[in-house]
Image (cartoon, rainbow, N blue to C red):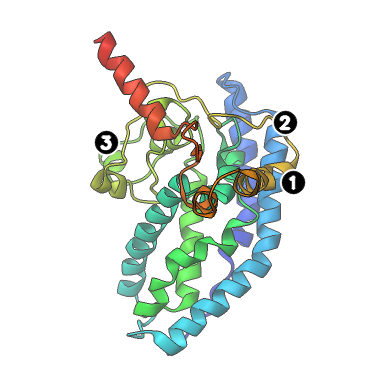
């Protein structure tokens, strides 16, 4: 198979990220949209740079594993053709949807993903607030792609394209896009919902590129009221090390210090964030149910 040389798209995109962030700051100031806070943006950018540097190691390891599966266990060998790339766009986005959704309902994966939600602001710098640990665990969701015949280089390239697409939707400067676009694609409006802590918005709109997955699998929520960003319990820290590892520390503490059975200690890793072995915890679904009941009473 003739394998083309494809550049690292994320590294090439970094200067454009910076320019767009500067542009958004200027536009936000002109329309009096107080969306940036210096310490918060600096933390997000630091997390993004850390993700890039750690990615040099993690992507090499992941590429090696994907290549091993591709070379030894793939059912087909899918060529580098236009139709293969088109198929991969949907296959990768479908995979991303389920990875993203599970990252909100399994505390093990949430421990990495929480970093991206830890800012109480929503702007292009928030898109750069990325995990330092997630690349070492999230790859398991993509293992089926080399198995059916997609070359690892294609897979990692499409994953980068997906991340590039998701950068521009982290903004409040864009309201609603044309109806046809909002119906098919992930947009700033849809993704503001995903980052919000309003009860009706929790664990909704997990799409990467196509919002159709959320509509098909029952996790879509339109933007109605103004989103409140951050976590249901904000960490109030700008320390990158704390931002990166605080949930891992809390997870291991809950698991190893809880006076309960070994099974229930293990469940801290697989149950949703907020779960407690004694039933005292509150899950996002509980918050949503309470909100639904309150709105029903009002009507």
What x and y, as percent, mark residue 20? 59, 42
Q: Position of residue 53 (x, y in %)?
A: 71, 61
**Looking at the image, is 83 positioned above or below residue 232?**
below
* Dot 2: element: helix
Of labels 3 and 1, earlier in sequence is: 3
Q: Which numbered disc covers residue 179?
A: 3
Q: Which mark is residue 38?
A: 2
Residue 290: quarter of image: top left
Label 2 to label 3: alpha-carbon separation = 34 Å
Q: Which mark is residue 112?
A: none
Mark 2 and mark 1 in contact? Answer it, CB < 8 Å.
no
Q: Earlier in the sequence, mark 2 or mark 3?
A: 2
Front tag of 2 and 3: 2
> Which residue occupies the foreground of this view, 103 or 128?
103
Q: Which residue is mark 1?
A: 241
- Locate residue 56: give its quadrant: bottom right
The span from disc 3 to disc 1 (Cα, nearest Å) is: 41 Å
Where disc 1 sits, the SS reads helix
Dot 2 surroundings within 10 Å: few (below 14), some, or many (20 or more)?
A: few
State left or right for residue 196 relative to residue 83.
Answer: right
Say if mark 2 contacts mark 3, CB within 8 Å.
Answer: no
Circle 1 crowding by C-alpha within 10 Å: few under 14, some 14–19, many from 20:
few
Q: Is 227 placed left or right of 128 in the picture?
A: left
Question: Of 236 and 189, which appears nearest the observer?
Answer: 236
In the structure shown, which secondary structural element does the residue marked by tag 3 occupy? helix
């Amino acid at each position: 198979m003739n394998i083309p040389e494809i550049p690292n798209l994320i590294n090439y995109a970094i200067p454009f990220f910076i320019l767009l962030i500067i542009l958004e700051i200027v536009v936000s100031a002109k329309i009096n949209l107080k969306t940036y806070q210096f310490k918060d943006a600096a933390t997000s950018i630091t997390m993004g740079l850390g993700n890039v540097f750690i990615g040099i190691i993690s992507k090499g390891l992941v590429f090696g594993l994907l290549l091993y599966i591709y070379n030894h266990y793939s059912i087909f060998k899918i060529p580098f053709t236009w139709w293969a790339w088109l198929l991969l766009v949907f296959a990768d986005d479908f995979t991303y949807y389920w990875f993203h959704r599970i990252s909100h309902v399994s505390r093990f994966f949430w421990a990495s993903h929480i970093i991206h939600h830890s800012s109480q602001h929503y702007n292009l710098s928030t898109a750069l607030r990325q995990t330092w640990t997630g690349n070492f665990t999230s790859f398991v969701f993509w293992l089926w792609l080399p198995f059916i015949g997609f070359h690892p280089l294609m897979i990692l390239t499409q994953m980068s394209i997906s991340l590039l697409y998701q950068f521009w939707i982290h903004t409040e400067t864009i309201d609603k896009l044309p109806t046809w676009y909002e119906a098919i694609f992930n947009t700033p409006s849809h993704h503001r919902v995903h980052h919000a802590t309003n009860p009706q918005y929790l664990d909704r709109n997990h799409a990467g590129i196509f919002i159709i997955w959320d509509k098909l699998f029952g996790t879509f929520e339109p933007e109605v009221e103004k989103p409140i960003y951050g976590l249901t319990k904000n960490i109030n820290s700008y320390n990158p090390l704390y931002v990166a590892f605080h949930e891992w520390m809390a997870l291991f503490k809950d698991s190893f210090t809880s006076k309960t059975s070994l099974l229930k200690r293990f469940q801290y890793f697989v149950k949703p964030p907020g779960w407690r072995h004694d039933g005292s915890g509150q899950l996002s679904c509980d918050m949503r149910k309470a909100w639904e009941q309150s709105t029903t009473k009002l009507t």
